[in-house]
Image (cartoon, grey):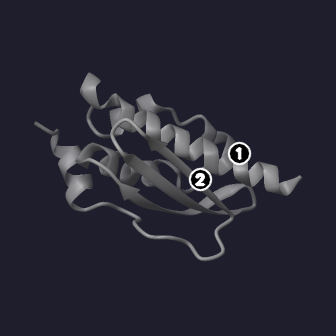
């Protein structure tokens, strides 16, 4: 049984889509279960001003990607890098142990997008 917050983000995912000319695009997937998240970020003056996701996966993966966008928008890159899978899980009301990989996937895609952005600035 999914928590009410998970079901809300699954049935009404926030910030779905892509950002044309995104500042960064990250991708992470879990080959074991097929969950994949692509995260698009628009970054201005070291702040994430927009975040969009495309998700293929189970309801919990969709919810984790959705809530991730809400957690990072308006944050500086340093603040966003401090967002951990535990934060994603907590924002969804806590995930059962068997679904924690979904919050880990959300953390991984965020790290991938920000690493790509920082790497392109050099």
Residue 76 shows in the view: no
Closest to the observer, 37 or 6: 37
* Secondary element at image label 2: strand
Q: Quadrant of the N terminus?
A: top left
Please tell me which residue is depicted at 27% across the width and 53% down the height of the picture: 9
The percent position of residue 97, horizontal first and vertical second, equals 28, 22
* Secondary element at image label 1: helix
- How packed is label 1: few (under 14 Cα within 10 Å), some, or many (20 or more)? some
Closest to the observer, 9 or 122: 122
Q: Earlier in the sequence, mark 2 or mark 1?
A: 2
The percent position of residue 47, horizontal first and vertical second, equals 67, 56
Using the image, determine if residue 6 lies above or below residue 95: below
- How packed is label 2: few (under 14 Cα within 10 Å), some, or many (20 or more)? many
Please tell me which residue is depicted at 43% across the width and 53% down the height of the picture: 70
Please tell me which residue is depicted at 71% across the width and 51% down the height of the picture: 116
Q: Locate residue 49 relative to residue 107 in the image: left or right.
A: right
Say whether marks 2 and 1 touch (CB < 8 Å).
yes
Residue 59 shows in the view: yes
Say the numbered circle drawn on residue 115. 1
Q: Which residue is mark 2?
A: 26
Give the residue furthest to the front: 31
Distance of label 2 from label 1 (alpha carbons):
8 Å
Please tell me which residue is depicted at 35% across the width and 34% down the height of the picture: 89
Residue 56, image quadrant:
bottom left
The percent position of residue 24, horizontal first and vertical second, equals 66, 60
């Amino acid at each position: 049984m999914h928590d009410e917050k998970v079901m809300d983000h699954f049935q009404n995912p926030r910030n779905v889509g892509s950002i044309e000319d995104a500042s960064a695009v990250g991708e992470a997937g879990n080959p074991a279960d097929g969950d994949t998240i692509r995260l698009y970020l628009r970054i201005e003056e070291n702040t994430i001003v927009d975040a969009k996701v495309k998700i293929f996966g189970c309801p919990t993966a969709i919810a984790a990607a959705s809530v991730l966008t809400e957690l990072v928008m308006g944050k500086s890159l340093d603040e966003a890098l401090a967002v951990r899978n535990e934060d994603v899980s907590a924002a969804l009301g806590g995930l059962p142990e068997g679904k924690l990989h979904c919050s880990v996937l959300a953390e991984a895609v965020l790290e991938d997008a920000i690493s790509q952005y920082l790497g392109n600035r050099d």
